[in-house]
Amino acid sequence: MSPTVLHVGPVDSRGGMQSTIQHHLANPPPGWSTEVIGTHVDGSAPSKWFAWRKGRRELVRRLGEDPPDLVHVHTATRYSWWRKRRVVRLSLAAGLPVVLQVHSGDFHRFIDRSSLNGKRFRDLCAHPLVTPVALTPAHRDLIALPPDSAVIGSPAPPLDPVDPDSRDPGKLLLLARSSPIKGHRLAISATLRMRAEGRQVNLHLSLEPNHPWVRDSDPEDGIHAHGWMTDEEKTELLRGAGLLLIPSEFEGMPVVAMEALSCGLPVLASPACEGILGGGGSIVPQLDERVWADAITAILDDEQGWRQMCIAAPAAVADQTPEVIGARWANLYQQVMSGVAT
């Protein structure tokens, strides 16, 4: 019988952690069975609390009656970490090894801002049964993990590039939760500035139409708020757009960038994504609407360069496809079970 890894995190919530967990469920590492317990839902504070209590009860029952071989915990900051720290402690009390994967790009600010949070994080990571995992080497260094700590990035779908001729270069995407650090207002301002200069660009967002950042705009302004999309709706946008924008203040390794590159959609990003775009994207050094408007314009004016980015994009995520990343997780899990993970 295959060993079982139990993932604990947001199974149905919006965001990159959910996408990563769903990827694990759809693509179990070779030789492993993958199961999951959800600890979060989108909605009101009481709904979130009840989801956590339900997930905790299920975890306690599972650890006592039918324990997995390994627990894979997915965490971000604040209340996510409050919940996941308890999940780790419950798992350790049951004598199970834990993989603690940090997804948040600004986790370093969270543990630096509070000495207590930092101490608790370091203490857990130092436990002999806990294996922390970062998204990139830069992410590992930011959250102050040892240099030999495991690094496994966000998953990409199977490579399926789109012919650039079927794309609309002026169709811009920003697909992220409504957090100020994701740069929605910058992208909106840059788009409006470009349209005022006569550029026929349109920005498509995963914000709700009544969100304060977009409620005074409409499609005639080039701003299209779709709300949170199904996978099918998101895929349709990714396969027809000309650029994915990631003007984030902080990022780890955004899943949406992996999804875009895998289908040949170029990515224009802030320095938070430095080192992960390969030839399929470009970095804008400043979080300034004028600089971003100029960067987008420069790409759209260089059709040949844009096409080259489309063609080069899939190669940037060739090491993050289900087959490759699945083998890496299987190898790490085996090391964890052998007590020699680094």
Image (tube, rainbow, N blue to C red):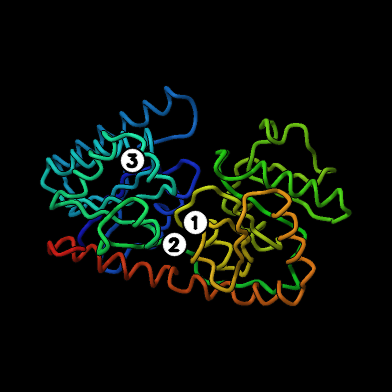
Q: Quadrant of residue 320?
A: bottom left
Q: Residues within 10 Å of mark 3 (few under 14, many from 20)?
A: many
Q: Residue furthest right?
A: 198
Q: Residue furthest top?
A: 46
Residue type at numbered disc 3:
Ile
- Tell me residue 211's x, y (percent): 66, 32
- Tell me residue 272's x, y (percent): 51, 55
Cα distance in 3D space between marks 2 and 3: 25 Å
Q: Nearer the viewer, residue 180 or 262?
A: 180
Residue type at numbered disc 1:
Val
Q: Quadrant of residue 75?
A: top left
Is residue 168 visible in the rendered image? The answer is no
Label 2 vs 3, first from the N-terminus: 3
Q: Quadrant of residue 5?
A: bottom left
Is residue 192 visible in the rendered image? The answer is yes
Q: Which residue is mark 1?
A: 255
Q: Nearer the viewer, mark 1 or mark 3?
A: 3
Q: Which residue is mark 2?
A: 155
Say what secondary structure mark 1 lies in.
helix
Residue type at numbered disc 2:
Pro
Q: Which residue is mark 3?
A: 111
Cα distance in 3D space between marks 1 and 2: 7 Å
Q: Residue at x 67, y 53 (%)?
A: 173
Label 1 vs 3, first from the N-terminus: 3
For residue 280, side relative to residue 217 (left or right): left
Cα distance in 3D space between marks 1 and 3: 23 Å
Q: Residues within 10 Å of mark 1 (few under 14, many from 20)?
A: many
